[in-house]
Image (tube, rainbow, N blue to C red):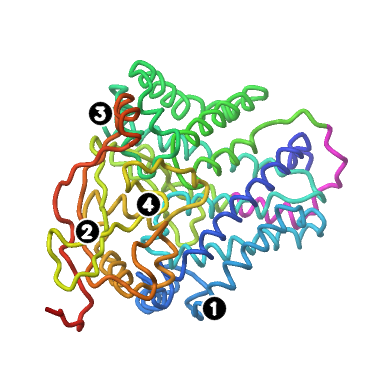
Amino acid sequence: MDWFTASDYWLSRLVFQRALAGVYLVAFLTAALQFRALLGSRGMLPIPRYVERMPFKAAPSLFHLHYSDRFFAACAWTGCAVSAALLAGLDSRLPLGAGMLLWLLPWLLYLSIVNVGQTWYAFGWESLLLEVGFLAVFLGNDDVAPPVVVLFLLRWILFRVECGAGLIKMRGDACWRKLTCLDHHHETQPMPGPLSWFFHHLPRPLHRVEVAANHITQLVVPVLLFTPQPVATAAAVLMVVTQLWLVLSGNFSWLNWITIVLALSAVEFPYDAPPTPDAPLWYEIVVLAVAALLVYLSYHPVTNMVSRRQIMNRSFDPLHLVNTYGAFGSVSRIRYEVVVEGTADDVPRADSDWREYEFKGKPGDPRRWPRQFAPYHLRLDWLMWFAALSPGYAGSWFGTFVERLLESDRDTLKLLRRSPFPPDAPPRYVRARLFRYRYTSWRELRETGACWERTYVREYLPPTRLAGVAQRS
């Protein structure tokens, strides 16, 4: 079938596949380095306890069959190795079927992680990586030109990512319609980056232009993805530019980067593709069958997008094959942060020697400037932002987190930038307090050197010690 492939997109596929492999590598590396404290046997939300109550059918995962910390580590590091091999182009050196199986392996491994990841993996970019990663299995390698239907479905994902985000904004917070959300967003976003302070202090008229441009990029430009070239390429490039602007303004894990990866698949690069043989019949049948399945499963995301009660970042099937997306349907006007402190004093008092734990990414010391971590995902830091919005977001894990600090648990301390206590001398008490944070002005920055100013609001968690530890007097 001559229409089945599009040789003009040979380089587009190559760029897409290598970039996607890079995102996979970051995702598996994040899992390998953080899982013990978050999901391990002694983690804050242990996987063994979760799989006992969650049926395999509802959340398919290798860890239903067997779990140990060593086995999880093996899966995560295997994912890193396979991702690195794909990044190096190993799939292009294999026969078509073997290359597809190689792309299937990281998808299966990451699906197994996400489906037992609970709160730590309840982010839209987890499902997005799985949906894109599943399609990548059927994109082929050097043995065949890129299938048109898969290229179309990649654009369909990009359309839903952008349009879903645009619609949730217009239906959600009124500040998006008034073009005023960026008066607050750079200050209150989950994890500011090193340039977020400067973005916040841009002139307000420019913020209005930013919001208007965002609406155009998310609600108008995605339609152009399905127009002839070079219009589709121009639309994709505009999306890439917009995503790079977001990369500069904050730390959003790999959400922006995988959106860029999707956009690159729609770019028609000026390149003479090498000759490729016709696609084998079995490959055409498999691709068309998968495409038909994904179109059928798209019913729920489409009805959700057109619904007045649109929800964002939801998967409609346990394999995360077709999902709905969206971000920042509402924008916080005030930034709150939970500050965690410990003391070695035998009796906790207001004037005790309380020492603050420092996190890697979330704001803490007002003088410490935010760093760039994305596309790497600091899962604990992100959940601490939600915990500051409401204790209900932290009810399942925060108590265990405090317990691990009181035990000076090595794996938990690795998630932090710095513990104020030596590993062999943990605190006797830990407390948490809620502060309001705001960016300093240009004048305050010059005078104090601090990018944040914080004000005490209330107690978040009273001084707490390990059960069974006697208080000395």
N-terminal of the two: label 4 or label 1? 1
N-terminal of the two: label 2 or label 4? 4
Disc 4 vs disc 3: Cβ atoms closer than 8 Å? no
Q: Comparing marks 2 and 4, which lies closer to the viewer?
A: 2
N-terminal of the two: label 1 or label 2? 1
Answer with left or right where residue 88 lies relative to residue 45: right
Which residue is at a point 84% across and 32% down the rendered structure image?
272
Residue 141 bears which disc, if any? Answer: none
Residue 215 covered by magenta stretch: no
Q: CA distance from mark 2 to mark 4?
A: 17 Å
Q: Name the residue carrying label 1.
A: 70
Q: Name the residue carrying label 3.
A: 174
N-terminal of the two: label 2 or label 3? 3
- Where residue 78 appears, as percent x and y from the top left, is 63, 68
> Which kind of residue does numbered mark 4 sit on?
Trp
Q: Name the residue carrying label 4.
A: 382
Q: Nearer the viewer, residue 342 or 317?
A: 342
Q: CA distance from mark 1 to mark 2?
A: 33 Å
Residue 276 covered by magenta stretch: yes
- Where residue 342 appears, as percent x and y from the top left, is 25, 64
Which residue is at a point 48% across and 69% down the rendered structure image?
60
- Where residue 350 appears, as percent x and y from the top left, is 12, 59
Answer with left or right where residue 238 lies relative to residue 278: left
> Which kind of residue does numbered mark 1 sit on?
Arg
Instruction: Name the secondary structure under disc 4.
Output: helix
Dot 1, crowdedness within 10 Å: few (<14), some or many (≥20)? few
Residue 473 vs 182, above or below: the answer is: below
Q: Name the residue carrying label 2.
A: 432
Q: Comparing marks 2 and 3, which lies closer to the viewer?
A: 2
> Which kind of residue does numbered mark 3 sit on?
Ala
